[in-house]
Amino acid sequence: MSGVIPRLALKRLSSHRLRTAVTAFAVVLTSVLYMTVLSIAWCIADSVQLSRQLATGSDFHAQLPQSGFALTPTELLRRVGSSPDVDEAYILSFSGSFRSEFDTDAKSAREIVLADRESVMKHLFLKKTKGRFPSAPDEIMLCEEVYPGLSVGDRIGFRFMTGEAAGGRELELEVCGFFVSDADFDLNGVMRWDETLDGELFSGADIMISFHSSIDIEGQLDELEESLSQYLEPGGKASGTVNYAFLGADIRSFFTAGNIALIIMITAVLFFASFLLIYNIYSIALTQDMRTMGLLGVIGMTFRQMRALITLEGLMISAAAIPLGLIAGYFIGFRALTPVFMSMSGEELPYRFNSLIAVISGGLTLFTLLFSATRPIRRIKKLTPVQSVSERPLPTKRERQRGSMNSPSPLKLAAASISRSKGRTAVTALSAALSVLLFTVVGAISGGVREYILRDMGMFDFETRLECEVEKIYADGRRVTDTSRADFNGVISRQIIDGIEKLDSLSEIHEIRSAKVTAKGSSRLSETIRAYRDQSSYKLSDPLIEAMEGSISAVVVGVPDELCRYIKVGENERGEPVYYDGSELYDGRHVLSVGGSISQYSGSSGFNGVHLYDGDLLSSDSMKRDYEVIYCEVYGSAALRRLCVLTPDFYEAMFILPMSVFSEEFPNAETVTLLMNAKEGREKELESEVEKIVDGYVWFVEPKNNYEIRLRGRIDEMRELDERLTAINLTGGVLCGIILLIGVMNMVNSSLTSVIHRRREYAMLEAVGMTEKQLRLMIIFENAVGAIAALIALTLGSVLSRAVVIASFGIDAGGLSLSAVIALAVMIIVSAAVSLVSFYIISELPVTQRLREE
Amino acid sequence: MIIKAKDLTRVYENGAQSLCALDSVNLSVERGEFVSVVGTSGSGKSTLLHLLGGLDRPTRGSVAIDGAELYAMKPDALTVFRRRYIGFVFQSYNLIPGLNVWENVTLPLGLDGIKADRDETESLLSSLGIYDKRFSMPSELSGGQQQRAAIARALAAKPHVLLADEPTGNLDSKTGLEVMLLLGKLNEELSQTIVMITHNEELAQMTARRIRIEDGRIVSDSGEGRS
Ligand SMILES: Nc1ncnc2c1ncn2[C@@H]1O[C@H](COP(=O)(O)OP(=O)(O)O)[C@@H](O)[C@H]1O
Ligand SMILES: [Mg+2]
């Protein structure tokens, strides 16, 4: 192509400065929009995956134990590694526990891993800080944080707990290097894998596998095992497991119909909003340009050259605006909004930028821009050059002839000019409506979340919790503190209770007590656990094996009689909590059975914790009598949510008795928590008085953990709720705000350009006797379309989103969203302002001059 | 014969109504002729000119320029043919805004990937009397100057045919006459074939051949006998 097209494109861009600037701004907005949404989506997916991987300690797709194969680990590694699907494979041997002469803490045994080569470290989230990877069996690489006093070259004695028939074995090892660990997994040392060492001291080697593709890892692993079946020992079985922490492993489960619909919807809304803006700008520009385009056609510009010209103009604007938008998007979307949005989860999640976010956002923006240009280009194609040089007005959309003979009013004139530019009016109206609608939706969501949380929120101002802080230090220096609670393992002393009861600011106080018992299991429970074992790839833990064999660890909770009707026993079909409202519980022969805390993997298998069922008996040697079980389909702490946060241990069954029955059965049971309400308006006072009383009280569960009493309760929960809502509102608000800005830009852009374009038409109307007042009225009518559309969107949106929230949460969060009303007000103000400016533009020049204008 | 139109018909469909703006017109123009087309407003003059130049599409009939059938070509091919062999001048000067005179004049060549010869362009602009204005923007020029620039642009690619639709329509009579004399000079000195529409009988009298159109038909043609 000749150089004339680029030069012409540049000329046009610089001679239509305002238009170029508006387009560029639209492009910037669009990329900020895409970038924000992509950043949030990416960071959520990434942090979920990363935190799961850190929790399990590796990012491998799967692991295949060598046991069962008639091959040595090295041979197996070679076979696995030569499979075409496998990207990388390593030999690892876990869980040799040991103690070094530097470990003073008698109880803790450390974890060590044997690895065959250095490149495995990145898969285990380890970073080398000093020295080198071990090259001989008598060398060890240590975790820097655990052994701060040692240095490379030191020789130290290690005592392995395993080996020599579990009597333990001493080894002298040389420290060859140090590492830091990002994983949540206590790995203290890495040694070089060695078959003898592994056989004597470790549990046997696993082949850790990364496939080329992370899709359908289960299928790939099955295939790999199948291909290796010839190497199995007689009667041996390949028992590979998938690392479920790897998101790719269950990527299919992420793509549920609901999630896909949500993704498509959000993308479509964003695309639509930015498309409307850019399309609007283009179509306006093009209407102004039709003559020029036709003229260029007359003097010999081919359609292809015109298309190249328009595309090139788009690309030139993008070249400047997209990088700008990406930078703005990085700061607005990633740095500012993503952390806010992620804080909603209540956890501190790691978030990392990926340049893919920028690439995809840029690409989407460019696509939006080029796609928006296709329609104007098609219109150019239809244009015959003669239309541009003939003196008659350019044909717009087909104008129907009307038989009306009434003299038109300003309203009618406005209606006529609106219907003449139907397309553009529709775009303006749509984008105005869209932003208000989105505000309504965000309002409804945050209202729904609020009501949903409030419904289950605790009833008491304060609750005593035995808590201690556990600090974790990441390799990059981040310190994350986590809270650990003693719950049913804790005790609140009598002295404290007596002290608090005397307080004047207290309006009511309740005690929750508990007792631990070993109870008899039931055949139904055994069956359930057996069924779970047969279809799960996880090994049963000891408590589960015991439960299957008929003995369960249980905690029996005593709840004050007057609070028993706040025990949640199920949910109705709308998801609303159902509380216990029977009378059997108080008769001294019945007990509520609540499932133990549910493990994260068992949910899908139909296994809901250790549980007794209707018809079973709660019976224990340490209890005076047996109780008939009332089964509740509620897990662990959920049953007591309105009262306290007490949670049973994993695999611990939980039973609830009213205090009247409980105190007869367990007269010496300890109090595990206190529930308090303050007298009206004296919450602060009660809080500080109780804090004085509990100050210094410490409960030891293990030597390491000193639990202290903290006061938590409704007041904190409300504050957390507010933070969470702020996050929703802020993120949603910024996104909607950008879309509102798009709506406003569309409005301003459309009406101002149309007014400038139609100055002559207005002058004509004035010349034939339209008064200024009528003219102003007409312009106001013309510009009201966007505001009217926004009003309709607000009304419909409020009704609809309220209906949706009621249907899905079973909650009526009320009608109007304040931010949507504000958005509507903005629209109205803008449309009024635009009318005013339009009128000013029109009346700026005298009629005669405007009539003469081309 | 440089232009040959046969049975040229153009019907405008406008909803239910249809209007026959040009009705079975046959016309030939020889190389080097200067033809004026006259007729009342709305008689179909512009329609004829547009069809002769390949700007529109006829409902029926054909146009050949130098033996090439215009309406047998694909749209882009027709456009390329037009920019090489046909020059247009209009009543409203239709210069491209944002480009100066020089850029406007050399644009058709540029679109063809040809770099305009500097000397030739300069002498073209001088002969049209707008050399001084070569870097001016269209908005800085008077009507007569704009029209001269438009003529220069039409001639830049050395077209075989120059088609002009009321080129003097927007000019005062003195400037109009100047432009007319300029066209006459082009015709005489360079044997430029010109078809020109005009309202002005006086100007029409200055051309060797006059065609009168009424209601889409040729009602008289002073050159009829010759061809
Ligand atoms: N694009 C069009 N659509 C409908 N009718 C048209 C169009 N262009 C021209 N006409 C009609 O065709 C007739 C001839 O027009 P035109 O060739 O422009 O006349 P002239 O140039 O002689 O004034 C007129 O009646 C005009 O109204
Ligand atoms: Mg005409």
Image (cartoon, coloured by chain):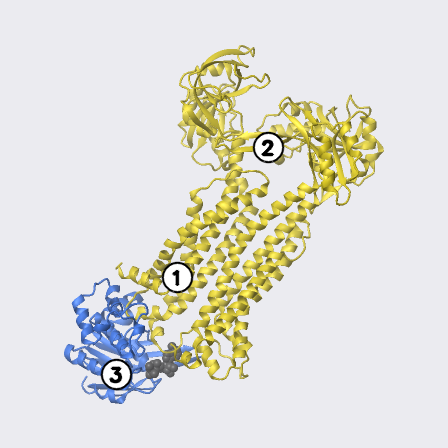
Q: Position of residue A692 (x, y in %)?
A: 72, 33
B108 is higher (above) or lower (below) than A187: below
Q: What's under tag 3, amino acid-wise?
A: Thr
Q: Residue at x 47, y 77 (%)?
A: A762
Badge number at residue A427 = none
Q: What's under tag 2, amino acid-wise?
A: Asp
Q: Colour of chain A?
A: yellow
Which image quadrant for residue A372?
A: bottom left
* Location of mark 2 (residue): A482
Which image quadrant for residue B7?
A: bottom left
- Residue A635 lies left or right of residue A775; in this view the side is right
Which image quadrant for residue B220?
A: bottom left
A767 is higher (above) or lower (below) than A836: below
Label 2 SS: strand
Q: Quadrant of ligand 2?
A: bottom left
Badge number at residue A20 = 1
Q: Which chain is indicated by disc 1?
A: A
Instruction: Give A144 or A527, whichever is nearer the viewer.
Output: A144
Q: Which chain is blue?
A: B
- Residue B82 lies left or right of residue A556; in this view the side is left
Residue A639 visible in the shown view: no
Instruction: Give A730 or A220, whichever is nearer the viewer.
Output: A730
Q: Which chain is indicated by disc 3?
A: B
Label 3 SS: helix
Q: What's under tag 1, amino acid-wise?
A: Thr
Q: Position of residue B21 (x, y in %)?
A: 35, 81
Marks 1 and 3 sit apart, C-alpha to C-alpha, by 38 Å
Badge number at residue B175 = 3
Crowding near the residue tagged with mark 1, few <14, some 14–19, many ≥20 C-alpha atoms within 10 Å: some
Marks 1 and 2 sit apart, C-alpha to C-alpha, by 53 Å
Quarter occupied by the C terminus of chain A: bottom left
Q: Earlier in the sequence, mark 1 or mark 2?
A: 1
